[in-house]
Structures are given as structure tokens and as C-alpha cells.
Image: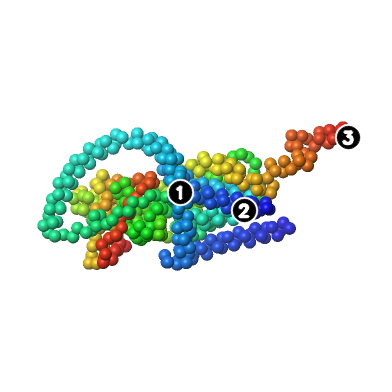
């Protein structure tokens, strides 16, 4: 089975489980008056780990699935999540950020974008009822709550998709050991020197 | 090679955005019986047993989290609620007396009693899915048209109105809560004048509704009009063969804020819903209104 196929299967399963768990359980738990939303975090994590193309496709699929499950206007959530997945993927491709707190900042940005983007689209589609300023407060609280859970969600997604990634660092390291490659604990000169001495 | 990758990436992105926009445009302009709605209904129907299963399987986790949250919240509310209870007990005695008198007089005058809740059947349903978005205040329940649920049926929970059915499948329904921006209710303040208006949500604030279009034109009317703490319930109405979607007398909430200037100039007051809309586990759907009557809602 090719790596791409294995990755696609894992991403489909991840999207399915994330949406079902989110809508059936997490959304029914209220924290500071709002519910956490793991779906933009999952899209962000896939983008950061797999790149822009996979991130955009995963965002589209997850968004469409949410719209279908919740029986709401099709295309709204997928449009927002495409952008989240794509931007997270581009961040990975252009900067390849290695700092541990990057998922935290990216998770906050993804949640803020999803909240504000939804507000903009709803205004464009037309709102009959008065809109409270508390909407902004609710978006901010949701961003804070999601920021708190961004790292665990990222770690979980990484655990799920990493074995299927073509350039998985763990697999590359294992392959290197098996074929007599470099250990990351050794400098190339040391290893070459030992070989020369052995010879 | 690199250029090819970039072109492919951009092409895929453009296709995805295009498909999303086409779906959005097509869905927004379509009726409830259109192909896209039917596909959506089918998928929601197929997934509903899975969601119900997941919801029930993970109920203990939800209960523990709710218990912790509720306990912390409850402690801060005890004193206030004790004071409210005393007020309501006194009010209940007065209302009981008025209700007995009203029933007696209505019987003597032969008034139509069929607008009330007693004219409907109650279907109890469990909440299986909740939408976390601030813009779609909806929940999904595990009862549908097979159980007699119909589009626009009123839904109650915590002994108060919580919303209306906005989507029906054979085994599931979607309830748009009264805090959803698509829902409005003809409501009445239980004050001396019985002031009636249209209750709409304040989008973004799940704990507030706005009762608007009250007919209060001067300070004298405002004095005898709605006051903070008064109950608000569905008004219900019947005009020839048209009838309100909501039966008369379902509690909705209490008046939380009255600004006399705003009340006179725009006829608006603020109302807090009685039901805990974010903590609903079980709801009751009022089905089966009298046959032969069309139902309507005040625009």
C-alpha cells in the first residue's frame, strides 16, 4: 500500500471521528459559557504536518462533513476550513517551524479565523435578528479555550498521521539504522573515523 | 518539476474553493425539497444512529464534566435563587387564584381552550448532537417524522420554550433554538397590560433575547408596563383559520432589563430565557395540533 493511500485513509478516519466526537460530546460540554471546537484545530494540525495540499483537502472534507451532519448551509464551513488547512500547510512548507509552541499559536489563529469568518459569511448571507457585541466576547473565549487544548489535539493528530507520512522522521531514522546510516547522536566525522579504524 | 507542483497546488485550491462557493450558492437558494437538501437529509439520517450511539456511550464523561461545572456554578447561585423562590411562591399563589377564576369564567363564556399545550401530544426526545457554532444555535434530537414530529413543531425543555423544529427526517429532527437568528416568537409579558411583542434573539449572546415591537408610547404606559423579573410566555393567537405556531402560555423567560427610553422609542426590552439552552439533554416536542387548521407565524 502506498504512503499516499495510507495517509488518505488515516485522514478520512480522522475527519470522521473528529466530527462525530465533536458534535456528540465535546460541543455539549460548556466551558466558561462556550464549547471547545476541535475541528479547526485538527485541520490546522493536518496542514502543519502534511502540507498545504493535504491541509486544504482535509479542511474541505471536514467542513463539508460538518455542514452535512449539522444540516446547515453547505459550503460555509468547508470554505473556512480550506483556508485554515492551506495556510497551516504553507507555514509548514515555507518556514518549517520547529518550535513546540507553534501549534498553540496556529490553533489560536485557526479558531479566531473560523469564528470571525463565520460571522462575516453570516452577515453576507443576511441576519434578521439584532447582533450582540457579546459575539466578539464569545469568539475570544472560544479562542482561549481552543488555545488551551491545541497542543494535545496536535499531538494526537501527529500520532495518527505521522506513521503514514512519506518523510516521517522516525521512519527515516529507523531506515538509516537498518542500512547502516548515520545516527543522529554521532557526528559524521566520528562515525567515519571509527569505520576507518575498524578497517 | 517545482513549477508543476505549484500549478497543481493552486489548481486544487481553486477547485475546492469553487466547489464550496457553488455548494453555498446552490444550497442557499434552494427549497427544502431540493436535491442538495435531500442528499443532506439522507446523510444525516444514515449518521444519526452512530451519533446517538456515541452520545450515549460518552454520556458518563459528559455527566462528570457537567457535574463539576454545575456544582461550581450552583454554589454562586444559591442565595439569589432562595430570594427568587420566596418571590415566586407569593406570585404563584396569586396566579393560582387568578387561574381558577379564569377557568371558571372561560367555561361560563364558552371560550376556545384549544390553543393551549393540552391540545398537543408530547414526544420526548434526547439531544444527540449540538452545534458549537455561535451562529447556528441548533441541536439534533433522536425523534423524527416516524414519531409524529413535523416541521415547525414547538419544542420545550426545562419547562420552557426552547425552540422549533427546523428539519425533520424519519428518525431525527433538528431543533432551532430560540437563540438562533432564524427564530422569532410572538410573546407576551405577564404584566398588568399583557404587553405583546415579537421575541427575537440577540445573536452572539445565548443568555439574552429581545422582545421588540411593544406598543408603549409614553411614560405612563411604561410605568404599568413590563418590569424586571416578570414572566414572558408565548402569546398564541388565532385569526379565522390561522393559528400561531406556538400554543399560548408556554413560559419562555423573565424580563431581565428595561430601559424606559428604549422601551418608548423602539419598544424593546431584554428577556433572559428560563431554560438552560446549552445544557439540554432531553426535550419535549409538541406535536399533533388540531386537524383542519393552518398554522402561521407573525412575520
Marks 2/3: CA–CA distance: 46 Å
Q: Residues within 10 Å of mark 1 (few under 14, many from 20)?
A: some
Residue at (67, 60) in percent of width and height: B7
Marks 2/1: CA–CA distance: 26 Å
Q: Residues within 10 Å of mark 3 (few under 14, many from 20)?
A: few
The residue indicated by pointer 3 is A199
The residue indicated by pointer 2 is A8
The structure's colour scheme is: rainbow
- Of the 4 image quadrants, the one containing the C terminus of chain A is top right
Residue A4, compared with residue A32, is above or below; it is below
Do we see residue B199 in this rendering?
no
Do we see residue B236 in this rendering?
yes
Which tag, 2 or 3, sits closer to the chain's start? 2
Residue B239 picture location, percent across and down: 23, 65
Marks 3/1: CA–CA distance: 65 Å
Chain on which label 2 sits: A
Q: Residues within 10 Å of mark 2 (few under 14, many from 20)?
A: some
Residue at disc 3, secondary structure: loop
In this rendering, which labeled residue sits more in front, label 2 or label 1? Answer: 1
Residue A186 picture location, percent across and down: 77, 34
Q: Are marks 3 and 1 in contact (CB under 8 Å)?
A: no
Residue A127 picture location, percent across and down: 40, 58
Residue at (38, 38) in percent of width and height: B70
Residue at (42, 38) in percent of width and height: B64
Chain on which label 3 sits: A
Residue B226 picture location, percent across and down: 24, 49
Please tell me which residue lies in front, A80 or A168. A168
The residue indicated by pointer 1 is B53
Tell me whether marks 2 and 3 sit on the same chain: yes
Residue at (31, 46) in percent of width and height: B158
Q: Any mark on residue B19, and which?
A: none
Amino acid at each position: 500500500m502506498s504512503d499516499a493511500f495510507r495517509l488518505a485513509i488515516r485522514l478520512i478516519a480522522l475527519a470522521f471521528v473528529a466530527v462525530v466526537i465533536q458534535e456528540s460530546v465535546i460541543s455539549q460540554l460548556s466551558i466558561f459559557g462556550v464549547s471547545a471546537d476541535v475541528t479547526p484545530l485538527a485541520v490546522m494540525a493536518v496542514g502543519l504536518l502534511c502540507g498545504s495540499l493535504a491541509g486544504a483537502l482535509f479542511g474541505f472534507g471536514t467542513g463539508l462533513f460538518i455542514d452535512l451532519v449539522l444540516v446547515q448551509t453547505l459550503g460555509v464551513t468547508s470554505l473556512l476550513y480550506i483556508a485554515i488547512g492551506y495556510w497551516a500547510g504553507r507555514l509548514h512548507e515555507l518556514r518549517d517551524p520547529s518550535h513546540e509552541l507553534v501549534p498553540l499559536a496556529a490553533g489560536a489563529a485557526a479558531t479566531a479565523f473560523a469564528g470571525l469568518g463565520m460571522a462575516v459569511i453570516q452577515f453576507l448571507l443576511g441576519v434578521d435578528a439584532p447582533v450582540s457585541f457579546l459575539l466578539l466576547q464569545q469568539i475570544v473565549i472560544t479562542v482561549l479555550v481552543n488555545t488551551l487544548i491545541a497542543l494535545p489535539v496536535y499531538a494526537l493528530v501527529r500520532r495518527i498521521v505521522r506513521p503514514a507520512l512519506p518523510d516521517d522522521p522516525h521512519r527515516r531514522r529507523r531506515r538509516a539504522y537498518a542500512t547502516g546510516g548515520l545516527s543522529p547522536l554521532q557526528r559524521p566525522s566520528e562515525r567515519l573515523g571509527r569505520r576507518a579504524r575498524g578497517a | 518539476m517545482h513549477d508543476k507542483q505549484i500549478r497543481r497546488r493552486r489548481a486544487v485550491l481553486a477547485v475546492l474553493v469553487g466547489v464550496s462557493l457553488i455548494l453555498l450558492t446552490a444550497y442557499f437558494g434552494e427549497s427544502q425539497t431540493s436535491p442538495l437538501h435531500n442528499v443532506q437529509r439522507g446523510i444525516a439520517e444514515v449518521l444519526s444512529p452512530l451519533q446517538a450511539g456515541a452520545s450515549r456511550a460518552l454520556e458518563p464523561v459528559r455527566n462528570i464534566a457537567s457535574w463539576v461545572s454545575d456544582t461550581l456554578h450552583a454554589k454562586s447561585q444559591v442565595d439569589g435563587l432562595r430570594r427568587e423562590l420566596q418571590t415566586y411562591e407569593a406570585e404563584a399563589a396569586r396566579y393560582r387564584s387568578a387561574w381558577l377564576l379564569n377557568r371558571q369564567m372561560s367555561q361560563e363564556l364558552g371560550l376556545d381552550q384549544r390553543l393551549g399545550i393540552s391540545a398537543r401530544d408530547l414526544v420526548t426526545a434526547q439531544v444527540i448532537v449540538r452545534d458549537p457554532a455561535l451562529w447556528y444555535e441548533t441541536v439534533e434530537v433522536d425523534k423524527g417524522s416516524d414519531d409524529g414530529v413535523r416541521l415547525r413543531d414547538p419544542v420545550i425543555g426545562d419547562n420552557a420554550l426552547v425552540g422549533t423544529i427546523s428539519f425533520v427526517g424519519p428518525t431525527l429532527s433538528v431543533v432551532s433554538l430560540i437563540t438562533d437568528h432564524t427564530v422569532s416568537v410572538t410573546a407576551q409579558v405577564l404584566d398588568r397590560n399583557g404587553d405583546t411583542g415579537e421575541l427575537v434573539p440577540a445573536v452572539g449572546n445565548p443568555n439574552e433575547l429581545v422582545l421588540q415591537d411593544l406598543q408603549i408610547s409614553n411614560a405612563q404606559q411604561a410605568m404599568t408596563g413590563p418590569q424586571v423579573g416578570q414572566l414572558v410566555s408565548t402569546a398564541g393567537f388565532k385569526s379565522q383559520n390561522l393559528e400561531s405556531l406556538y400554543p399560548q402560555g408556554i413560559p419562555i423567560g423573565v424580563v431581565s432589563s428595561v430601559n424606559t427610553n428604549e422601551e418608548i422609542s423602539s419598544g424593546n426590552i431584554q428577556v433572559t430565557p428560563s431554560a438552560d439552552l446549552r445544557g439540554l439533554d432531553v426535550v419535549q416536542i409538541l406535536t399533533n395540533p388540531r386537524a383542519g387548521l393552518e398554522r402561521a407565524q407573525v412575520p
